[in-house]
């Protein structure tokens, strides 16, 4: 386990699922961890109590609140943008406001949060954004808007990697496939459809994703930037 003792980590969207696993992992590695959440107050409180991390309620779609949270964290060594919504269904039927909110959380927040984190980020800092294999592959109908938000993160990471590369800051996207969380339960209605196209034939675990995040955050990953890192059990193979 790489030691993150003394490092400051901010996880945007850390109360549940993949984000909560990332919070637990960095906290266990000695980092000073803050995380944000929007609605899951009880889960956020419990996570803060069990890990010693600081929970901050801030809607990632509210730019002013997000930027204030980033500034309040002080210089951030590792910025993880995990907040995400999945609005799926027939595009002819989807509520346009719900789609716009997904774009706000998945894309606008990722961009503005990452840029703000970079302002005061020390040399060799890390920006890690949680995308999705759906940024590359869309094997089912009903997820076009979600896939669009995750593809957008790819262009962002390529560009910000060049913008901040001279400072030793790396920018990477982690692209999970089906991962067992509240968003996508391993026993959910689409599980067997997803398992059928996966090499592993099962949902991934949040801890599998966390391993990759930890690697990208580590000093040894200094040459890895502007890149997409898919961890999808062969979903897109
Ligand atoms: P969950 O729905 O289980 O958890 C989402 C987390 O994001 C919660 O902590 C939630 O906080 C937070 N969040 C959502 N909206 C906001 C917001 N507006 N402001 C602040 N925090 C917010 O999802 P997962 O853990 O499954 O997903 C995490 C990321 O991984 C997402 O970006 C998702 O797109 C991506 N992903 C997930 C996959 C999967 O199969 N699970 C596959 C590929 C990618 P709260 O509820 O407290 O508001």
Image (cartoon, rainbow, N blue to C red):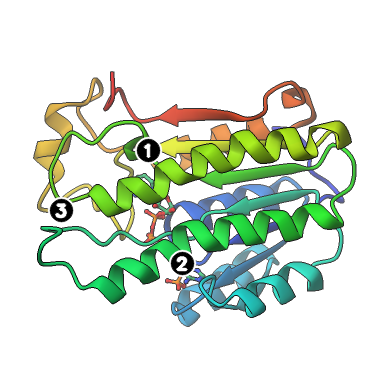
**Left or right of 87 on screen, residue 59:** right
Where, by quadrant of the figure, is residue 162 drawn? top right
Labelled disc at residue 135: 1
Mark 3 and mark 1 residues within 8 Å of each other at the beta carbon: no
Q: CA distance from mark 1 to mark 2?
A: 17 Å
Mark 3 or mark 1, earlier in chain: 1
Labelled disc at residue 145: none
Q: Residue at x 67, y 54 (%)?
A: 114
**Left or right of 52 on screen, residue 141:** left
Image height of 62 relative to 110, above or below:
below
Where, by quadrant of the figure, is residue 16 drawn? bottom left
Indicate the position of residue 169 as horizontal and vertical percent values: 79, 37
Name the quarter where the N terminus is drawn. Answer: top right
Labelled disc at residue 188: 3
**Disc 3 residue crowd, few under 14, some 14–19, many 20+, Cα 10 Å:** few
Indicate the position of residue 73 as horizontal and vertical percent values: 79, 67
Disc 2 marks which residue? 104
Q: CA distance from mark 3 to mark 1?
A: 21 Å
Mark 2 or mark 3, earlier in chain: 2
Instruction: Please name whichever residue, 148 or 117, is drawn nearer the observer in this view of the structure.
Output: 148
**How many numbered markers are drawn?**
3
């Amino acid at each position: 386990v790489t030691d993150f003792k003394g490092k400051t980590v901010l996880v945007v969207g850390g109360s549940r699922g993949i984000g909560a696993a990332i919070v637990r992992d960095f906290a266990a590695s000695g980092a000073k961890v803050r995380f944000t959440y929007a609605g899951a107050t009880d889960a956020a409180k419990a996570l803060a109590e069990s890990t010693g991390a600081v929970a901050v309620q801030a809607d990632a779609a509210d730019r002013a609140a997000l930027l204030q949270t980033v500034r309040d964290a002080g210089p951030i060594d590792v910025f993880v943008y995990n907040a995400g919504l999945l609005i799926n269904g027939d595009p002819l039927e989807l509520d346009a406001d719900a789609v716009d909110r997904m774009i706000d959380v998945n894309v606008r927040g990722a961009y503005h949060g990452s840029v703000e984190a970079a302002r005061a980020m020390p040399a060799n800092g890390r920006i890690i954004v949680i995308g999705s294999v759906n940024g590359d592959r869309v094997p089912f109908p009903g997820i076009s808007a979600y896939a669009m938000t995750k593809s957008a993160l790819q262009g962002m990471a390529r560009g910000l990697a060049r913008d901040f590369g001279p400072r030793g800051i790396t920018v990477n996207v982690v692209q999970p496939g089906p991962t067992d969380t509240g968003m996508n339960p391993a026993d959910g209605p689409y599980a067997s459809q997803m398992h059928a196209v996966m090499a592993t034939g099962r949902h991934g675990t949040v801890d599998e994703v966390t391993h990759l995040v930890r690697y990208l955050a580590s000093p040894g990953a200094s040459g890895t930037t502007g890149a997409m890192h898919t961890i999808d059990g062969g979903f897109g193979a």
